[in-house]
Amino acid sequence: MLLKRDFHLFLREPAQIIHFSVLFFLILVFVSSLPGLSMMASKRVVLFTFVFLAVYIFNIFFIITISLRYVFPLVSMEGNVIWKIKSAPIDTGKLLNRRLATPLLVIMLLSQFMSIFIVGRFSGHLIIPMSVVSFASTFFLAMMSFGMGGLFIDLKEKNPVRLSSSQGASISFLFSMIYLVILIIFLFIPLSDFFTGYLRHRIYETAAVYKISGVILILSLIGGYLFYRIGVRSFEKDV
């Protein structure tokens, strides 16, 4: 029922459909340029690593945009119905989880599809660890957007575009950029070491990439959960 309701709400907002279509078109254009980029940088390890990270980070940046646009406004979009929910014998936490489940699942599937497609163009050996990084990043960014949306709830605003451009969304975007920078710092050396052997047809190790992906997963799960709890507690306290 909630999935059907969310789908109909999405279709009734032309701005959301247009925004999503534009983003998806930009992804197709960007992905189509991957073969040329990888060939151009294939003889220089550092440059190849930078190109790989730039292309891969585009996937994460796409997740940031989608999360801010479709996850951040979720709580506020309930409007005055929230008061009826609060007065009814319903577990608010479970209801919020169900509202979050649909967009989280869609974003997670898109992220994994893009990750596998992009990474596979560079090296099939990196598909699994980078899929783990994509899962971790998607969870963290979606939970942060949801939590910040609860922290900066605005029940009077009905326009999701305005909500995703509010002060709270700007702060959430800033945190996302910080996370993105940390992600690049964590990944650069392990990936550079891997590509050094891979491009020169020498012995290469993926162990370091797997280890750092595990670290990113653990930290992202913890950070995402903390942001989620902050938003839920603020929502339960203020509404």
Image (tube, rainbow, N blue to C red):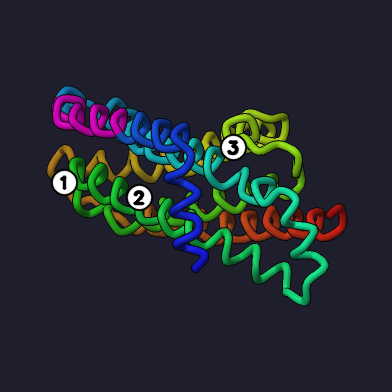
Q: Secondary structure at mark 1?
A: loop
Q: Secondary structure at mark 2?
A: helix
Name the side, left or right, on which 139 lies relative to 107. Answer: right
Q: Quadrant of residue 195?
A: top left
Identify which amino acid the numbered label 3 is placed on: Pro
Task: Give percent across and percent down for residue 39.
Answer: 14, 28
Identify which amino acid the numbered label 2 is placed on: Leu
Task: Give percent across and percent down for residue 12.
Answer: 47, 43
The earlier-in-sequence mark between 2 and 1 is 2
24 is higher (above) or lower (below) than 235? above
200 is higher (above) or lower (below) than 221? above
Identify which amino acid the numbered label 1 is placed on: Arg
Q: Quadrant of the C terminus?
A: bottom right
Q: Which mark is residue 147?
A: none
Crowd rating for badge 1 (residues with CA inside 10 Å; few <14, some 14–19, many 20+): few
Residues in magenta? 25-39
In percent of the image, x 34 and y 34: which residue is there? Answer: 21
Disc nearest the viewer among 3 and 2: 3
* Residue for badge 1: 202
The earlier-in-sequence mark between 3 and 2 is 2
Disc nearest the viewer among 2 and 1: 2
Task: Give percent across and percent down for residue 173.
Answer: 61, 33
Task: Give percent across and percent down for residue 69.
Answer: 53, 38
Disc nearest the viewer among 3 and 1: 3
Name the side, left or right, on which 110 lies relative to 166. Answer: left
* Residue for badge 3: 160
Taking the view exactly as shown, the residue that stands out farthest to the right is 237
* Residue for badge 2: 110
Mostly what secondary structure, the magenta segment? helix
Q: Nearer the viewer, residue 22 or 172?
A: 22
